[in-house]
Amino acid sequence: MSGWIIEHLNTSDYEGWRWLFAIEGLPTVFLGILTFYLLPDSPEKAKWFTPQQISALVNKLRTDNETAAALNKNTNSSFLSVIKNPVLLQLSFAYMLIQAAALAANYWLPGLVKGFSADFTDTDVGLIMSIPFIFAMFSMPWWGWHSDKKNERKWHAALPMFLAGCGFLMIALVPSMSLRMLGLTFYGVGILSYYGPYWALPSALLSPSGLAISIAFINSCSSLGGFLINKSLGFVSTHYGTTGIFIVEAILCFAAVAVLALMKIDVKKEKSQQTNVVSRT
C-alpha cells in the first residue's frame, strides 16, 4: 500500500511521501483518540467480559499486587539501584544491538530491494517488503506459544536474533535473487519473533518494584542504539556500500545473541521463587 501511494499519488502539488503520512498517519491519530474514550480502565468496566471472567481477572490482579509487595518488602527501587542491576544492563545492551539493526534495516532495505531489479517500481518494492512480515504474522504467535510451552525465554529470544543475522548476511553476500528473498524472509521472521520471549524476561528476572524503571531504561537504550547506528551507517555506506551496511547489521544481531547467551539466568527458578513467596503470604 505504501509503495502504491508513493508511486501513484506523487504529483507536483503534493508529493507521494506527504500523501503517505497523511493517509496512513491520520487513521492512527483518530484511533488513538477513540481508544482513549472507549477503552475501559478496569476489568469491571469491560462489557465484553462475563462476570466469571471479571472475577478471575480481579483476583489475578490482586494476587499479582500481593506478590509484588512481598517480593519488594526489603528492596531498594531507586533509579540508580535499579539500573545498576547487571541483568538489566545485559538485557538493555542486547535490545540496543538488535533494535539498532532493525531500525537501520527499515531505512536501507527498501532501497536495496529496489536494486534487485531495474524494472521494480515502488509498488513492487512494497509488495516484496510485505513478504517477510506475512511470514512473521504466523511465526510470532507460534514462537511465543512454543516459548510458553517449554517455559524457556532466553534461547527463544536469542535464536530469532541469530536467524535475522543470517538473513542480513544472505542479503549482503549472496548474488542469487531467490536466496536474497529467502534472506529477507529470515530477517523479517527473526527480527519480529524474538519480541514475545524477550519481553517476558524483564518481568521474570527483575524486581517488580523497579520494573517500570527497567522497561523505560531498556527502551531508552534502544533509542540510543538507533541514533548511533544511523550516524555510523552513513560512513559505512560511503566506504563499503550497502553490502557493508548489512554485514554490520548481521554483526549487531550476532552480538545481541552473544550477550543473551552469556547471561546466566534460570527463568524456571525465578518463577518458582515468586510462587514460594506467594505461598508464604
Image (spheres, rainbow, N blue to C red):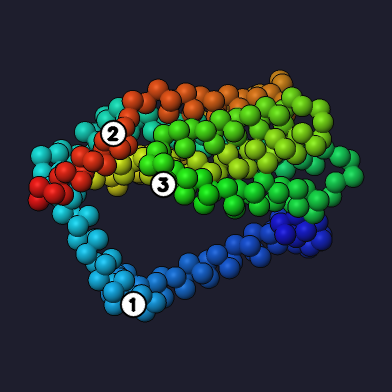
Viewer-nearest of labels 2 and 3? 3
Mark 2 or mark 1, which is nearer the start of the sequence?
1
Residue linked to disc 2:
83
| 200 or 278: nearer the viewer | 278
Residue linked to disc 3:
148
Mark 3 or mark 2, which is nearer the start of the sequence?
2
Q: Identify the residue at image location x=28%, y=74%.
A: 52
The amino acid beneath tag 1 is Thr
Cα distance in 3D space between marks 2 and 3: 27 Å
Q: Residue furthest top?
A: 239
The amino acid beneath tag 2 is Ile
Q: Identify the residue at image location x=28%, y=33%.
A: 83
Q: Position of residue 178 (x, y in %)?
A: 80, 37
The amino acid beneath tag 3 is Asp
Mark 3 or mark 1, which is nearer the start of the sequence?
1
Q: Position of residue 89 (x, y in %)?
A: 35, 30
- Crowd around label 1: few <14 · some 14–19 · many ≥20 (10 Å): few
Q: Is residue 156 visible?
A: yes
Cα distance in 3D space between marks 1 and 3: 26 Å
| 150 or 22: nearer the viewer | 150
Q: Relative to 173, is 268 above or below?
A: below
Q: Position of residue 186 (x, y in %)?
A: 65, 38
Q: Identify the residue at image location x=75%, y=39%.
A: 181
Q: Is residue 227 left or right of residue 12?
A: left
Residue linked to disc 1:
50
The total of numbered circles placed on residues is 3
Q: Are marks 2 and 3 in contact (CB under 8 Å)?
A: no
Label 2 residue SS: helix
Cα distance in 3D space between marks 1 and 2: 41 Å
Q: Is residue 220 visible?
A: no
